[in-house]
Image: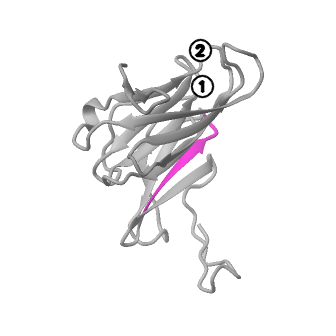
Amino acid sequence: MLRFTDDGRTWGDGSLIAADDYNETDILHLGAGRWLAVCRTTLDYHVQLFASDDDGRSWQDRGPLTQSAEHPAHLLRLADGRILFTFGIRIGKRGVGARFSDDEGASWSNPRILVRCKRASDGGYPSSCQMADGTIVTAYYTNRIDAHARYHMGVVRWLPSSKNCCATTRVEWLDGAGSAVAT
């Protein structure tokens, strides 16, 4: 992690989040000098969680957030304070998964599948944003869908369940008119 003090003209004062086996890192500033980082491993391609309480000068390994071949990842602070963690699923039930934390990353909900990519052998790289109405838009890619066998960029708009539901989070799909669709 690099820092600047001159509006980004020069960068320095670097610190290492994780060594050797990690790449494709996404970071999230929690405030008050606290950060989270999720890193893809190169050994078995899972996502590992790291945390800093000193503005990124040192990092602690908090353990894996996904299983093997579930990567890469994205972190987003939601308007209700929860943290959304989305990730690619490249084995088994392929697609895009999500987990929530309502305690600044100390614990996480069980994984949920947002998008199924049954025919894909490659995909992921999700990126999410929250809209003013509270819905989440998650973009991703896959190399096959039912309609064709080429690379495909997809977007899903969905509604996370209430704040106090991390252990039982449901994904509620929205139709084109913004109405909830049964899952």
Give coordinates of residue 1: x percent, y percent.
Answer: 59, 66
User: As shown in the figure, which amino acid type bears the numbered disc 1?
Assistant: Arg
The image position of residue 177, as x and y in percent, is 46, 31
Which of disc 2 and disc 1 is earlier in sequence?
Answer: 1
Q: Is residue 10 depicted above or below 153 in this figure?
A: below
Asked where in the image residue 104 lies, by quadrant, the reply is: bottom left
Give the percent coordinates (x, y) of residue 135: 42, 42
Side of 31 where 141 appears, left or right: right
Q: Which residue is mark 1?
A: 90
| Residue toward you, 26 or 133 | 133
* SS assignment for the magenta stretch, majority: strand
Is 2 in front, or is 155? 155
Which mark is on residue 118?
2
Residues drawn in magenta: 35-43
Instruction: Decide: few, some or many residues near mark 1? Use Cα within 10 Å; few <14, some 14-19, many ≥20.
Output: many
Residue 67 in percent (x, y) is at 48, 30
